[in-house]
Each structure stands twice: as C-alpha cells, then as structure tokens.
Image: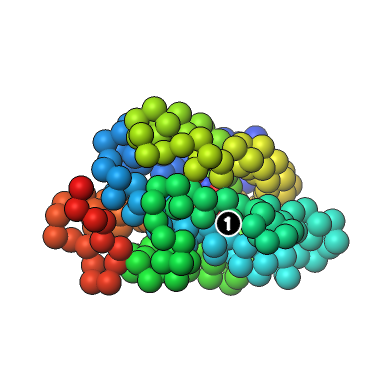
Amino acid sequence: MTGHALSPDGLEAALRAIGAERYHNLHPFHRALHEGRLAKGQVQAWALNRYYYQCRIPAKDATLLARLPTAELRREWRRRLVDHDGDAPGTGGVARWLKLTDGVGLDRAYVESLEGLLPATRFAVDAYVDFVRDRPILEAIASSLTELFSPTIISERVAGMLRHYDFVTPEALAYFQPRLTQAPRDSDFALAYVREHARTAAEQKSVLDALTFKCAVLWSMLDALDYAYVVPGRIPPGAFTPEPA
Ligand SMILES: O=C(O)c1cc(C(=O)O)c2c(n1)C(=O)C(=O)c1cc(C(=O)O)[nH]c1-2
C-alpha cells in the first residue's frame, strides 16, 4: 500500500477514532453489565472469563519485555509485570481480580483452574498473546493502546455496578481503582512511542491495524459471553453454568 504519512497528531487522531468506533464499552453485553440488566450468574460469567485475560496479560508483557532492545524500554515495560503480578504473594492486579471473583461468589480454585472458560475466551486472549509475541515491537506496543480508552469504561463500570447490583461491594471492585492511574501512565508511554516510531504510511497502517485487532479481541470476548449467557440453552459443554436464580 502506498499513501501519505500522517503527522504524529494525525496518527493519534486516527487511533482515537478507532477507539471511538470499536472499543468494547460499546458492546451490548457491557452496556447490560453497567446498566444493571444482568443477573448474578451473568456477572459471574463475565468475571470468570475476564480472569483469563487478566492472568495472561503478564505473560503477554513478558514476551514483549524479552524483545525490547534497551534498558530504558525494559524498565518501562517491566512495571506492567509488577502491576499485574505484584511483588509478593497476594499483591498485584491478578490477585485483586480474584477478590472480584470471590466477591461475586465464585469459588477461587474453580476460577483459577480455567475449567469453566468459554472456548472463545481462550481463543481471543491467546490470539492477543500470540500477536504480541510474533509481531514487530511497534505493533506489539500499539496493540496495548486500547488502554487509552479504559479509564472511561472503568469509571462507568464501577459506578454502574455499585449502583445496580446488591451483591457487588466496593471491596470487590478494588481491582479497578489503581487501573485509573496505571492505565493512563502506560498508554501515555505507548502512545508517545508509537507517535515517534510510526513514521511511514506503512508503519502507520500497521499500528492502526494493531489497535483494530486488539479492539476485536475485546469485542469477541463479549460476543462469546453474549451468545452463551443471554439466551438459554447456549452454554458450551463444560463451560461455567450459573446456579438457577
Ligand atoms: O476493564 C477494562 O475494560 C480493561 C480494558 C483493557 C484494555 O482496553 O485492553 C485492559 C484492562 N481493563 C486492564 O485491566 C488491564 O490490566 C489491561 C492491560 C491491557 C493490555 O493490553 O496490556 N489492557 C488492559
């Protein structure tokens, strides 16, 4: 493909336009979650499946960390590993996500076993980890840029869930509070990197495609939940089955 390269501001605007059109805050299942239209079993299904995303994020960041060429870049990226894995047992984002699955009444060992996952959750999350492992560093970094849009969805989610669900407590949602500062810090770095390094039209197309791909990962995770847990009779064999209300 040929074409004119955008200015850094033009590239940023194009990235933000992708989020405005494709980020998962627009998905019907997310809207239902935030607006209080889900039953407890459906909220459990969301938390259980999203656990797989959370627990693979450190593996995704570790494969990228191993490929980064400078100490400066590695120091920056290594913080993400600490954010998610903590630096002692029971700390970090993955452990805090388990407080959420505990809080909505799921058995921790069952969540951690991954036995109840929807097949499509696994495919979508694994596709993200593989993408970051296999693609050029520029695209791998660009694929994290959905985090530009996450503070808004997180604020909506916390407010909406606390307001609408009596089984959700502020302690269970403690996962999200640090993300409101971590995500902007991380996405500011990734955005500055992409603005600086995506100079040619081909490089810019590759980063726009990487962000589109990542939006599709998040969107398809919600498609899978929407398919399995909204209309009765569609839960795949072996996947988490809510108790009758
Ligand atoms: O709650 C959300 O909607 C949401 C979205 C995203 C995202 O946009 O990828 C992340 C997170 N949360 C999150 O908690 C998180 O740790 C995270 C890491 C990443 C990434 O791509 O490296 N995205 C996200």
Q: Judge left or right: residue 36 versus residue 182.
A: left
Residue 195 visible from this viewpoint: no
Residue occupying image coordinates x 24% and y 56%: 243
Residue occupying image coordinates x 38% and y 63%: 121
Q: Judge left or right: residue 86 versus residue 168.
A: right
Q: Nearer the viewer, residue 217 or 119?
A: 119
Secondary structure beneath label 1: helix
Residue furthest to the left: 233
Q: Which residue is mark 1?
A: 94
What x and y, as percent, mark residue 59?
Answer: 61, 67
60 w.r.t. 202: above or below: below
88 w.r.t. 199: above or below: below
The amino acid type found where label 1 is placed reads: Val
Residue occupying image coordinates x 31% and y 33%: 36
Residue occupying image coordinates x 55% and y 36%: 151
What x and y, as percent, mark residue 50?
Answer: 44, 55
User: Which image quadrant is residue 238 in?
Assistant: bottom left
Residue 192 visible from this viewpoint: yes
189 w.r.t. 114: above or below: above
What x and y, as percent, mark residue 181?
Answer: 66, 37
Q: Residues within 10 Å of mark 1 (few under 14, many from 20)?
A: many
Q: Is mark 1 within 8 Å of ligand 1?
A: no
What x and y, as percent, mark residue 153?
Answer: 47, 36
Tell how many labels. 1
Q: Judge left or right: residue 125 versus residue 221.
A: right
